[in-house]
Image (cartoon, rainbow, N blue to C red):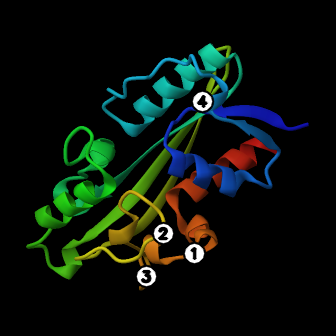
């Protein structure tokens, strides 16, 4: 029997990506639209894992069912891991994807090709109503380009070249990206846990 899970996010693009990746897994997915009174969770953790656990626990408690929260970020090695936990609001509160990656490109403008390494990190927390939590992480190593390319994906996808590839995540088809992405890796670990 499928496990019923509510996704602890209001990010439409993230929801679509997760649903696409888990479509063949033994899960039935609900969203926060199915729980209209669910309170907003303030993401004030110092790490991606803290934020994911906080969101998952709050939503699981409210919905009285398992909740899956994802906190993801881009870590650039030459910037001491920034934007990291601040990836979604790197250019300030309410900044959109474009403003965030434009700020990143400005900060990296003087960096040579061999200093443009980084990785996408995804930490997923699956929380249960009894407060138990399982953690699943995924990583995608790569390089940060010098200008955005491609129109697919979201976040920093237009400037991220996964290792060994000459196209950004935003230039790839969804199923290509899903095989390489940090979120795909984390969900693969979730799948192993479920079966």
- Height in image: 137 above or below 135? below
Q: Earlier in the sequence, mark 1 or mark 2?
A: 2
Relative depth, front residue between 87 and 77:
87
Q: State which mark lies toward you, 2 or 3.
A: 2
Secondary structure found at label 2: loop
Give the x, y percent position of residue 33. 61, 30
Which residue is disc 4 drawn over?
A: 32
The residue singled out by tag 3 in the image is: 167
Q: CA distance from mark 1 to mark 3?
A: 11 Å
Front label number (3 vs 4): 4
Callouts 4 and 2 close, C-beta under 8 Å: no
- Residue placed farthest to the right in the image? 1
Picture residue at 21% right of the left edge, 80% below the top: 113
**Earlier residue among tags 3 and 4:** 4
Q: Residues within 10 Å of mark 3 (few under 14, many from 20)?
A: some
* Residue with the mark numbered 1: 173
Q: Nearer the viewer, residue 78 or 8?
A: 8
Q: Within 10 Å of the Cα at label 1, are there few (<14), some (14-19), or many (20+) other Cα atoms?
A: few
- Cα separation, mark 4 vs mark 2, equals 24 Å
Residue at the (73%, 49%) spot, across then down = 191
Are the residues flagged by discs 1 and 2 in contact, CB closer than 8 Å? yes
The x and y percentages for residue 124 are 54, 40
Q: Which mark is residue 152?
A: 2
Q: Position of residue 15 (x, y in %)?
A: 58, 46
Is residue 38 shown left or right of residue 42?
Answer: right
Q: Give the alpha-carbon distance from disc 3 to disc 4, as whole Å.
A: 34 Å
């Amino acid at each position: 029997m499928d496990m019923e899970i509510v996704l602890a996010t209001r990010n439409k693009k993230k929801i679509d990506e997760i649903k696409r990746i888990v479509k063949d897994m033994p899960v039935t997915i609900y969203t926060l639209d199915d729980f209209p009174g669910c309170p907003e969770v303030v993401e004030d953790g110092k790490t991606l894992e803290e934020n994911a656990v906080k969101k998952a626990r709050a939503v699981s408690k409210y919905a009285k069912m398992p909740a899956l929260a994802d906190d993801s970020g881009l870590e650039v090695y030459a910037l001491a891991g920034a934007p990291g936990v601040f990836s979604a609001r790197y250019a300030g509160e309410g900044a959109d994807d474009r403003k965030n990656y434009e700020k990143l490109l400005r900060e990296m403008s003087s960096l040579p090709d061999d200093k443009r390494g980084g990785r996408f990190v995804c930490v997923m927390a699956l929380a249960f109503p009894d407060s138990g939590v399982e953690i699943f992480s995924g990583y995608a190593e790569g390089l940060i380009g010098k200008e955005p390319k491609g129109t697919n994906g979201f976040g920093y996808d237009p400037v991220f070249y996964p290792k060994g590839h000459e196209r950004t995540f935003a230039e790839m088809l969804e199923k290509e990206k899903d095989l390489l992405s940090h979120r795909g890796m984390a969900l693969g670990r979730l799948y192993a846990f479920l079966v």
